[in-house]
Amino acid sequence: MGEITQQNIWPDMQIEIDPNSYSSVVEMFEQAFLTYPEKTAYVGLGGSLSYAEADRLSRDFAAVLQAKLGVKKGDRIALMAPNILAFPIAMLGIIRAGGVQVNVNPMYTPHELEHQLNDAGAEIIVVFGGSTSTLAEVVDNTPIKTVITIDLGDTTTTKIPSPPVDERLSNTLRFAELLDDGEELDFDPPVITGDDLLFLQYTGGTTGLSKAAVLTHRNLVANTEQTKAALPEAMRHGQEVVVTPLPLYHIFALMVNMITYSSIGATNYLVANPRDPEQLISAYRDSGFTVSTAVNTLIAGLAAHPGLKDIDFSNYRAMIGGGAPVQEAVSNRWKEVTGHHVLEGYGMSETSPVLTLNPMGQEEFSAAVGYALPSTDIIFLDEDDHQVGVGEAGEICAKGPQVMQGYWNRPEETASNFTEDGYFRTGDIGVRDENGLIKIVDRKKDMVLVSGFNVYPNEIEAHVAMLDDVAECAAIGVPDEKTGEAIRLFISLANGSDLTSDQVIEHCRQGLAGYKVPKQIRFLDELPKSTVGKILRKDLREL
């Protein structure tokens, strides 16, 4: 159906990667431990860890899981924590013991947590103390037998005040004490191959009940090698400094920041609370960073922060944007400060996650998500599963070594989300030009039909975001007697702005076709967002 050709990717980049260049993600980390033992691997609240310390501590945790808790290869273990130093140690211990890590959002509601633990069949959870009250609400309704609690200062010698463990949870084990126990235990490393499960990565749940993408070690090895091939100038071994404000339970930061950059000996600054402006700015200011990943809303906040002037950009290489569309106004502001546009990419949990990326060094904002990564074949299908031509909109469908095996325990959904010849249906609408550059038009389900015309909210949002008075905006479709559906636009204004609905509509009329102009404007103090920073259109629809 599709074919991997040089036209799918930008010139001079390799067409293929070897998804078996490492036998597993564990081997990838263990090679980094041997190559960069004295180098600082992770910096976070309370201190830092070298690669040698990460090796030793994660080995001790793996030994405890194996010898004391009976963990066998393939057992699902939930990890529910923010970006603190215990996160990489817990993760590495889980996967070195052969466990399958179930990535859990520490901000989940009891209902969401109960669903995920039951769906995954996890019997062990490693949980931040601040999230234990949520767990206590539902733990008796889940398979969980062992609760391991993490404090903010674990793995450091610093005493940091940390939320207490909920008293309703009995017989919990403390992560720090288990690390001490592990020093005395033998560890028998299991044989792990590319086919073995690595993560159950739950979809964001923004469109209904969350389900888990089954990701193997080979999926993540492949995506790390693809990312390295796409960003050679920002992949200098032992030299990169990465700031990680996006949560590590999200596959974007987990794959790019944690796995890819750790594999080349980077130093990773973990931001525990990116909503704290001082904590966020200080990470960029104090690190001498070279690379970061973020979503559009976070980059916009950074670009507008007065502390931006104190950041040293002399070593800067790339800001990689994903998770939601990067708006032109935001990328332009970022370029004014750094001299470089945000590098927008595209992907999803089901694809480990990256499918496409813009090349480094582009002079103009492309309004595109870039080119297909090496070994990635992307096609565009119409409603009848026929490929559309260059420049025509169709559903983006992808095949490559980073694409998931399927959804956990959901064979029917797995089957319906793949074409007969094995392409994953992303549910996103896009176009590709004659050079292979891919643009996302919108989510299939977010498309609005106005008087028979297809209207894509992203286009409206990007245009309105060019107004300096607009901090954030989001468009949805609402029922309309005359046109079937109409556009309702939600706007959060910049401080002190007195922008009116009439001014917004006039701006839209100057740059958009008449049927795309919003019929209704609503002003909100803040737009609802997921913990990753995506604006939640489903919450806006409920308003």
Image (cartoon, rainbow, N blue to C red):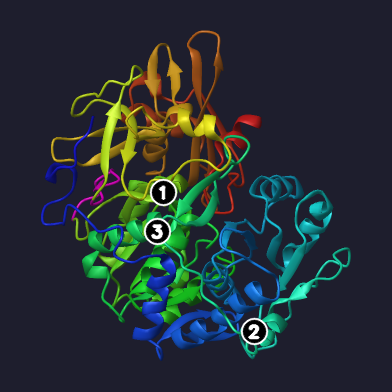
Nearer to me, 132 or 225: 225
Tell me: residue 100, above or below residue 151.
above
Q: Main secondary structure of the magenta part?
A: loop
**Residue 507 visible within the image:** no
Q: Write down the region rendered in magenta.
A: 363-374
User: Whole-Å distance between the Cαs marked 3 and 2?
Assistant: 27 Å
Left or right: where 21 falls relative to 38? left
Q: Which residue lies under the disc numbered 1?
A: 468
Three-letter amino acid code at disc 1? Answer: Asp
- Distance from label 2 to label 1 (Cα)? 55 Å
Q: Residue 331, image x and y in percent?
A: 33, 54
Of 139 and 452, the residue lying toward us: 139
Quadrant location of the C terminus in the rendered image: top right
Q: Is residue 116 magenta?
A: no
Disc 1 crowd, CA 10 A, few/some/many (<14, 14-19, 20+): few
**Residue shown at 56% from the left, 86% from the top:** 47
Quarter occupied by residue 418: top left
Where does label 3 land, which residue?
Answer: 194
Precedes in sequence: disc 3 or disc 2: 2
In the picture, the disc for residue 182 is 2
